[in-house]
Image (cartoon, rainbow, N blue to C red):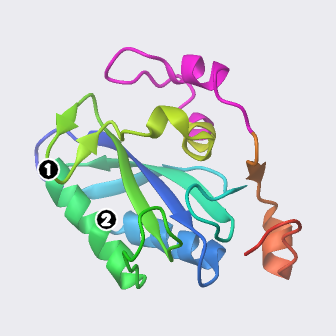
Amino acid sequence: MTDAAPITAYIGLGSNLDNPHTQITRAFDALAVLPDSKLVARSPLYRSRAVGPPQPDYINAVAALHTRLPALALLDALQGIEQAHRRVRKQHWGPRTLDLDLLLYGEHTLDLPRLSVPHPYLSERNFVLYPLADIAPTLVLPDGRSLAALLEHCDRDGLVPVNETELTTGAVSGTHL
């Protein structure tokens, strides 16, 4: 890492194609070796209903990185990981092998053509808020809202913690994976 102070970035992970559990596990591994970055936390996995057109359920998680990469360089690195996982962007909110979203980049608010931070849907998605709370329960967003306050208005409808034993046996009940 360079001499600049690291920024804590939170990354949302999601997959609903080609063995989603493996996709997420490999994505955590890829995040752990990003240059000028250190993976400092990873949430438990959750199964969630898909947003958008009919498609299989997702496996979701959130990671925390300490990084010295500029926001757009981090976005490029995340998109490179997606491409390595054969991510194809055919349909908005469609099924995917891997989706990596830059949810928060320190205290920064960015509105760029390629990147909006905080992520525009962060406060609306239970599959982001609950895993985020698992690794950063006292988090306060750049606009001053606390994660705890957001969770007060976010139900767990369709969000189920993934039992690791079920994943290793291939018997994830009630899912379309």
| Residue 103 position by quadrant | top left
- Horizontal and vertical percent position of residue 76: 21, 65
Magenta residues span 133-156
- Horizontal and vertical percent position of residue 61: 57, 54
- Classified by dominant secondary structure, the portion drawn in magenta counts as loop
The residue shown at (16%, 54%) is: 72
| Of callouts 2 and 1, the N-terminal one | 2
| Residue 121 position by quadrant | top left
| Residue 117 position by quadrant | top left
Instruction: Check the picture and name the quadrant holding the N terminus.
Output: bottom left
The residue shown at (31%, 23%) is: 142
Asked whether 87 falls inside the magenta stretch, the response is no
Q: Tell me the distance, in whole angstroms, between the alpha carbons under discs 2 and 1.
A: 16 Å
Q: Between residues 1 and 113, which one lies in front from this camera angle? A: 113
- Disc 2 packing (10 Å; few <14; some 14–19; many ≥20): many
Horizontally, residue 14 falls left or right of residue 58, namely left
Residue situated furthest left in the rendering? 3
- The answer to whether mark 2 and mark 1 are in CB contact below 8 A is no
Q: Secondary structure at mark 2?
A: helix
The residue shown at (56%, 41%) is: 125
Instruction: Check the picture and name the quadrant holding the C terminus.
Output: bottom right
Asked whether 136 falls inside the magenta stretch, the response is yes
The answer to whether one can see residue 69 in this image is no
Q: Amino acid at mark 1?
A: Pro
Q: Amino acid at mark 2?
A: Leu
Give the residue number, with chain letter if any, for mark 2: 78
- Horizontal and vertical percent position of residue 55: 64, 70
Q: Between residues 10 and 59, which one lies in front from this camera angle? A: 59
Q: Which mark is residue 113?
A: 1
